[in-house]
Amino acid sequence: MDILIYGAGVIGSVYAARLQEAGYNISLLARGQRAVALRTHGIQLEDASTGRRTTTRVSVVEHLAPTDSYDVVLVTVRLDQLHSVLPILAANRQVPTLLFMLSNPAGMRQFEQLDPQRVVPGFPAVGGVRRGDVVRYIPLRQVPTMLGEADGRMTPRLRQLAGIFKQAGFTVKLSSDMQAWLKTHTIMDMGIIAAAMMTGKKSALLARSRHNVVMLVQAIREGLLALRALGTPLTPFYLTVLFLWLPRWITVILLQSLLRTRISGLGIDPHLDDDIEETRQMAREIMTQLRSSPLATPTLNRLMEVLELTTH
């Protein structure tokens, strides 16, 4: 199977290396100095949980032409970069499956330029940071690689994609409502990132501020309730348990514990710097939707003001 990974950041690099090692024919789209480094040194990964370093050679391409043919294009660019990629994908009608691994609370409205039958929404199961030519990453075991057809069907294509990722060593979960999953997850992600921005731009500092974690828990609770009031089911289910069912003090303790971990440092902190514009775009989209909810979100609104006003 021929797979193009569109984007050579942390997510694209990890998926490209794992899929190549699993025996698939992988091409990785990169440009400029990143393309030069990949051709010279290969994909250099460091698993932060074990310290193990690997180097994987893949084919590196610098563009997707209208006549290029792949079985799947796996899109791993940031949400704020997507507008420049969509016309290129639309011009190529040879690829039957475009799998988007990114935060996208706008749903299918984001892909109006594309044939909807080609689009598969998903979400990656890895976080990390690239320093020079080396990608230091950590698998997010609490968040499997998520896949789902836009219309919720469990199709042969979806099961084939799941099999591909499982063969590459990823945990995979199929969703019958990927649009709801992405919206629910966005509320938690943007809340944590905004609270960390407010607390010295480090997740570890946020963990030590009980006041701010209490505020964060209240903000996420408001967002989830407002989203549910709009008729959107809350998924994954553990977020309902964590933020709506458990006593607040227990949720605060659990979040403080999570924010002290290595997962938090590599999964959250990179979004507090160069990736902050992606988070702002996510926040603007979901907050526009929540404004039509019958339930108010005053605490979440305050956090979003911090997200918009804070500079690097």
Image (cartoon, rainbow, N blue to C red):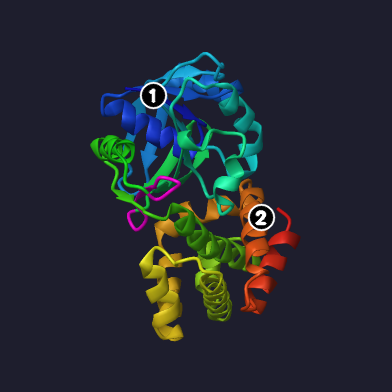
Name the side, left or right, on which 170 lies relative to 191: left
Q: Which residue is mark 2?
A: 280
Element type at mark 1: loop
Q: How far apart, in angstroms, are the residues tagged by discs 2 and 1?
A: 33 Å
Who is closer to the viewer here, 298 or 289?
289
Q: Quadrant of residue 4?
A: top left
Q: Quadrant of residue 167?
A: top left
The answer to whether residue 260 shows anywhere in this view is no
Q: Earlier in the sequence, mark 2 or mark 1?
A: 1
Q: Amino acid at mark 1?
A: Asp
Element type at mark 2: helix
Residue at 57%, 81% in the rendered image: 211
Q: Amino acid at mark 2?
A: Arg
Q: Position of residue 54 (x, y in %)?
A: 33, 31
- Asked if the stretch drawn in magenta spans residue 199, the answer is no
Q: Position of residue 100 (x, y in %)?
A: 48, 40
Asked if disc 2 and disc 1 are in contact, CB closer than 8 Å, the reply is no
Residue at 38%, 75% in the rendered image: 241
Magenta region, residue range: 141-152
Q: Which residue is mark 1?
A: 71
Secondary structure mainly formed by the magenta segment: loop
Name the side, left or right, on which 91 lies relative to 154: right
